Image (cartoon, rainbow, N blue to C red):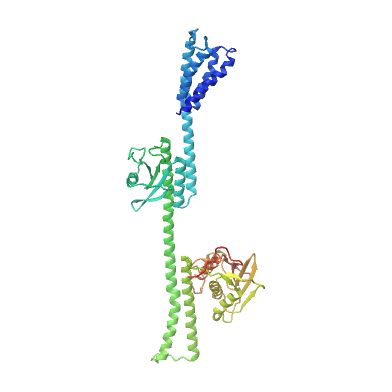
Amino acid sequence: MSRLQFLESIGLVALATLLGLPIRTLLHPTNLVMLYMAAVVIAAFFLGRGPAMLASFLSVLAFDFFFVEPRLNFALADTEYLVTFNAFLAVGLIVSSLAGRVRLQVKALREREAQVEALNDFSRDLTAALSLDTILNDVIWHVSQTLGREIVVFLAQDAALERRAATPDFKLDESELAVARWSFENSQVAGLGTNAFPQSQIRFAPLKTLRGALGVLGVRPGTAGQVLTPVQGQQLEGFAYLAAMAIERALLAEQANRAQVLGEAEKLQTALLNSISHDLRTPLVSIQGVLDSLLEVEEGGENAVQLDQAARLDMLENAREETARLNRLVENLLDMTRLEAGTLKLRLEPGDLQDVIGSALAHLNDQFGSRPVSVTLVEGLPLIPMDFVLMEQVLVNLLDNAVKYSPPGSPIEVSVACQDNQALIRIADRGPGIPSAELEQIFSKFHRLNRPGQAKGVGLGLSICKGIVEAHSGRIWAEGRSGGGSVFTVALPLERATGKGREGRT
């Protein structure tokens, strides 16, 4: 208790005396005792037991001095007042003791309420935290704010403790680290204010769950040797328990994510190997067959078949087509690798969509054959900020997809329009269309429509298109077409997005 509280109790007795002096002639002196009793009760509730007891003694003296005849001295004309004094003193001491006890209980309840509220806030923030780093930051902030101390968190890493988070400028020496390791290994609190290593200036609480200790939480007071109160010690253990549960949840989530990534990587590897074993081998076998046949003719072997000029040209044309398909397949695999690694950079420059479309059509001219291809462009189409080479690759993939998934001789329509500050490029075919359930999935890696006589490919073309278009801050989607067929739409912004253009391409 502070000196101020005792001075305040003296002030309460003085106030009771000042209030009694004007009315002392109107009341019997024993009735004025209630003023002093009120002062004692107020002192007990608001100042504590010690100041209340002081108020009890001073009240007896003040009552005798100012209100009992003869006044202004401590002599007694009537010895009956001794009973009054003793009764008042006894009642005052009892009231002060009981009121002081109630005050302590109220204070303890308020501290417990604050403790529960702090733990609830901490638990709520930990529940909302998704990553381990966020959880550790919440631990540091809440514990330091509640306990007013410097905080450090160690987590187990390969049977050792690794420092993962701390308040600024938190430093430990080897002796403190030894206390932290002991607390972790024995799953017990240790350090300042405990039975284990009490000479330490840091108090460590283990972060333990049903699976064992995950690490330790350390707190260091701003003033050396300032021990935690029992309530603060309970708070620290509560914080450590909630933090351990949240950290365990984050670690399990990371393990699940790693397992999922490994599973996806395994699926990707399997799909890639299957694709390579079939889709890469098929054109190679065709090319090798053509070369072997032509070599046998040139060498004039016994089993050589004589080929006329038309047959030779047909075989060479087939080899060229397979070579072009093999080249596109390898390009798609390389582009997907760059997209996944984040090394595919853009060289954004104002470009004419008409030139891009024309270049893509020329690239696939041999594949169109007798198939009619129409191009419709809006008048006054502005230049679009884009990477010419990559956007050409997008249109080549979309046109190649339209050729593969539509009947020979069916038309392919390409149109460009402007809408909502975007350029919309649409490529429409008259194929069998895409089931509504697969309109989103077709842009996933290695996804191909399951149909009889399925077109050749690895299932990367549309996924690459999506990655390139989104790198341009655009969108790509597929829709069914009235009367049969599919429409693929690419939306590109007419103006360069801030911070999106990056020079150079890997």
Q: Nearer the viewer, residue 178 or 122?
A: 178
Give the quadrant of the N terminus.
top left
Q: Residue furthest front?
A: 72
Residue 141 x %, y %: 46, 46
Residue furthest out toward the right = 379
Q: Is 209 displayed left or right of 492 in the figure?
A: left
Say above or below: 189 vs 498.
above
Can I make out residue 449 in this image?
no
Vertical placement of residue 444 versus 134, above or below = below
The x, y position of residue 173, in whole percent, is 34, 47
Tell me residue 138's x, y (percent): 46, 47
**Residue 126 visible in this rendered orientation of the protein:** yes
The residue nearer to you, when weighing 453 against 125, is: 125
Q: Is residue 500 above or below residue 236?
A: below
Report which quarter residue 260 is drawn in: bottom left
For the point 42% across and 91% down, the residue is: 298
Which picture quadrant has residue 438? bottom right
Q: Residue at x 45, y 78 (%)?
A: 283
In the image shown, does 274 or 351 lie closer to the viewer? 351
* 297 lies left or right of 490: left
Please say if 316 is above or below 68.
Answer: below
